[in-house]
Image: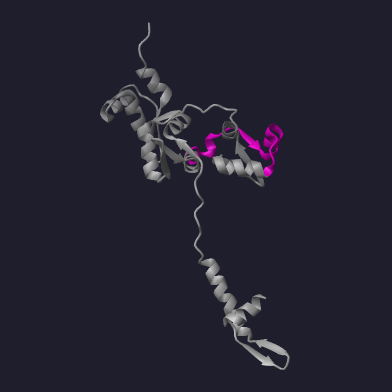
Amino acid sequence: MTIYNYINQGAVKVWKLKRKTLIRRADIDALFDILRVEQVTETKVPTPITEFYTSKEVQEKYGISNSRLYEIAKREKWPKTQQRGKTLWSRKHVHAYFAKQQSTDEISEWYTAAEIQARYGMTLPAIYCLVSKEAIPKKKVGAATFYSKYHFDLAKGIAEPKEPEYYTYPEAMEKYGLTRDQLHHYLKYHNITRVKKGKYTHILRSELDNLLKSPEI
């Protein structure tokens, strides 16, 4: 029926030879070349975003300040929307960003897929779906794939979010009401541990908190 429809529409020419209907091979090849081009150039419809975090949830989950949240969101171009006066951020984009911030070298405990199946009774497709949805860090060793134990337990609601180990300069300045010069003076004079991650300097949270904590008797 498809071929007859093309004939009736004039998309291909036919020749009658006694009781046979002949179609030139080149016309058929050209017809399907056109169809392949149309399929390749077909516009993809973006997948709608349906899962979100509020600003407060992002701050509590990842231990960042409100100003730091907006700084990251602007730079990374996180999709957002408004609902009842609250700003909602795409959960997928938030997870993907923070998953990249922790190198797999810093993760010490891992699950195999078999261990996850034994502990949580999940099928392999369910594991892969959760890993993708929550951007859980993973690594390959030979043919085996391992998944971050902490991030998987966190996604299943078993683990509690960890307090970040380091402050960025803006986070420390906002928390303690310091200018950059004042903060730099404290860090240098008291020899607070600092590490360089990419182009950013991070400050060891425990040492700075201990230095600037309220006095006790």
Image coordinates of residue 50 in percent, x first then y, are: 51, 43
Q: Is residue 163 magenta?
A: no
Image coordinates of residue 14 in percent, x first then y, are: 63, 87
Q: Quadrant of residue 203?
A: top left
Image coordinates of residue 206 in percent, x first then y, are: 43, 22
Q: Quadrant of residue 19?
A: bottom right
- Residue farthest front in this picture: 8
The way the protein has been coloured in the rendering is one colour
Which quadrant of the rendered structure holds the N terminus? Answer: bottom right
- Residue farthest right in this picture: 19
Query: Which is nearer the eye, 132 or 14?
Result: 14
Query: Which is nearer the eye, 93 or 170?
Result: 93
State the extent of the magenta-drawn residues as a range. Answer: 99-124
Q: Quadrant of residue 195?
A: top left
- Residue farthest top in this picture: 217
Q: Is residue 118 magenta?
A: yes
Name the residue rendered at 31%, 26% in the picture.
188
Image coordinates of residue 181 in percent, x first then y, are: 26, 29
Number of marks in picture: 0
Name the residue rendered at 48%, 39% in the picture.
52
Vertical position of residue 132 compared to residue 85: above or below: below
Which quadrant of the rendered structure holds the C terminus? Answer: top left
Query: Which is nearer the eye, 194 or 78?
Result: 78
Q: Is residue 205 left or right of residue 39?
A: left
